[in-house]
Amino acid sequence: MLRIGPYEFTSRLLLGTGKYPDFDTQKEAVKVSETEILTFSVRRMNIFKPDQPDFLEKLNVEKYHLLPNTAGAKTAEEAVRTAKLAKASGLCDMIKVEVIGDEKTLLPDPIETLKASEELLKEGFIVLPYTSDDVMLAQRLEEMGCHAIMPGASPIGSGQGIINPLYLSLIMEKANVPVIVDAGIGGPRDAASAMELGADGVLLNTAVSGADNPVKMAKAMKLAIEAGRLGYEAGRIPRKRYATASSPTEGMSIG
């Protein structure tokens, strides 16, 4: 069971709703993923451009827990304003804090992320900050009261997978709140690896929406996350330098 603040979820897959080839593909991918949490940029809501199609129009949003994010914000002030707009629109009280510090790498700004998270916690939000794989930053955000930590595996949309498993594992080892790997996942192997490291969940968007067949990829990610979690809970065998016979030799007569 994944617990974020007062909420409990069976699925450990959080799915983005953007960049699908069409609404019908989006709807089917969401369905087969069996996700319970949908994330999206508040700036893409049609409250900004009422003449544009509603990117959630094909989805029965009442079946899902919505996790709006502050994508596009470059300062804490912008992120807080965007989050308040989402809450005022009746979306939910849970927000993914995303404050980008560099346009080329799309890496988060740690200082502005801390500021925005602190302010939104004071405002009563359930706060899930998107961060780099900085171990101390993750610790500070948890100490501040954030309800989950969302470190990136690699740059947003890069598909590079996990480039620093050591730091991710250290974040997971220290954390007392859920750690959800967010950004950079490219395929099912990456998602399973994140879960085997000890992640509590994985957030995906481009890896599914940008696949040749988003629906099949959504299902593959669902299964990979489930397999990775089971593997983590089961406990893998230690790596050894030399071979170890898989069949016992005790009690065998030779010759």
Image (cartoon, rainbow, N blue to C red):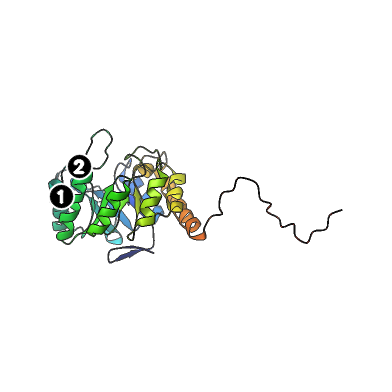
Q: Which mark is residue 72?
A: 2
> Residue 49 at what x, y percent from top left?
14, 44
Q: Measuring from the top left, give residue 184's x and y in whole percent.
A: 36, 41
Residue at left offset 55%, top offset 52%: 238
**Looking at the picture, does residue 108 appear above or below residue 30?**
above
The mark found on residue 82 in the picture is 1
Say which quarter of the image contains residue 88. Answer: bottom left
| Structural crowding at the residue carrying mark 1, measured as other residues with C-alpha within 10 Å and reported as few (<14), some (14–19) or many (≥20) | many
Classify residue 162 as left or right of residue 66.
right
Question: Taking the image as drawn, is residue 44 in sight?
Answer: no
**Residue 169, image x, y percentages:** 40, 50
Q: Is residue 52 left or right of residue 173?
A: left
Check contact, mark 2 vs mark 1: CB within 8 A. yes
From what the image shows, is residue 243 above or below residue 63? above
Residue furthest toward the bottom? 6
Neighbour class for label 2 at 10 Å: few (<14), some, many (≥20)? some
For mark 1, give the secondary structure.
helix
Amino acid on which the number 2 mark rests in the picture: Gly
Give SS at disc 2.
loop
Q: Is residue 10 visible in this depiction of the protein? A: yes
Residue plotted at (42% across, 49% down): 194
User: Which quarter of the rendering shows the N terminus?
Assistant: bottom left
Three-letter amino acid code of the residue under disc 1: Thr
Left or right? Give the position of 2 relative to 223.
Answer: left
